[in-house]
Image: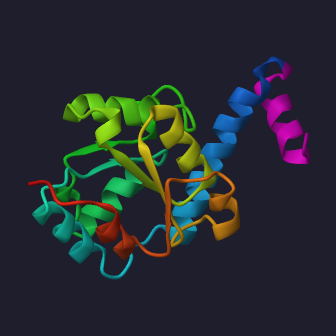
Amino acid sequence: MTLIEDRLARGLGQAAGFTQIDWVRERLTVAAILLEHGKIFAGIAEILAALKRQGITLAIVSGAYSAVLELLRESNLLEMFDAVILGGDVSKPKPDPEGIRKCLQQLGIAPGAALYVGDTPIDVQTSRAAGVYSVGVLTGAGTSANLSAQSPDRLIGTLAGLLDCIEPIE
């Protein structure tokens, strides 16, 4: 147990165990990633628009909270998404598949017809647990080594690579 984990365990009570410690760590990690990486990547509006033109349903499942919505709203991107599931909408954090399953149910999409794009190893683990296709993208917090170690179905360098991962719906 690291010093931080030890202090979290003491703060949450020894009976808290690693599940709650992992939950707190996830929240802190999400906050740090949003502070560091919480930006709209150049060209994302065009990529999302191209996917929408292909008939692709777009959704967000994130452990983050309202900061994500504000970022998308300020960038005029929120309306491109058909569903948004955030950390406050689920009782269990990733890698539990609750968020993805809730999103799929809301949209009426079967797991085998969906893919989840993420930039961390936990994102790949979550997609596996939900039974959806996983795409690791290297434009965020993850590295090639730590994403590859989780064996995503596809690993792409940039979000533009999504256009090559998805076949248009006819």
Residue at 89%, 37% in the rendered image? 6
Residue at 61%, 64% in the rendered image? 142
Residue at 44%, 75% in the rendered image? 158
Asked where in the image residue 76 lies, by quadrant, the reply is bottom left
Protein image colouring:
rainbow
Q: Nearer the viewer, residue 126 or 12?
A: 126
Secondary structure mostly seen in the magenta stretch: helix
Query: Is residue 7 magenta-colored?
Result: yes
Q: Position of residue 58 (x, y in %)?
A: 24, 52
Q: Height in image: 126 above or below 123?
A: above
Q: Nearer the viewer, residue 60 or 170?
A: 170
- Is residue 56 visible in the rendered structure shown here? yes
Residue interval drawn in magenta? 1-14
Residue at 20%, 64% in the rendered image? 51
Query: Is residue 102 magenta-colored?
Result: no
Query: How many numbered discs?
Result: 0
Q: Position of residue 35 (x, y in %)?
A: 54, 66
Q: Position of residue 103 (x, y in %)?
A: 31, 35
* Quarter of the picture holding the C terminus: bottom left
Q: Height in image: 4 above or below 170?
A: above
Judged left or right of residue 138, residue 116 is left
Judged left or right of residue 61, residue 25 is right
Q: Position of residue 28 (x, y in %)?
A: 64, 50
Judged left or right of residue 54, residue 150 is right
- Is residue 40 visible in the rendered structure shown here? no
Asked where in the image residue 1 lies, by quadrant, the reply is top right
Q: Please, which residue is most extreme toward the bottom here? A: 42
Judged left or right of residue 96, residue 112 is left
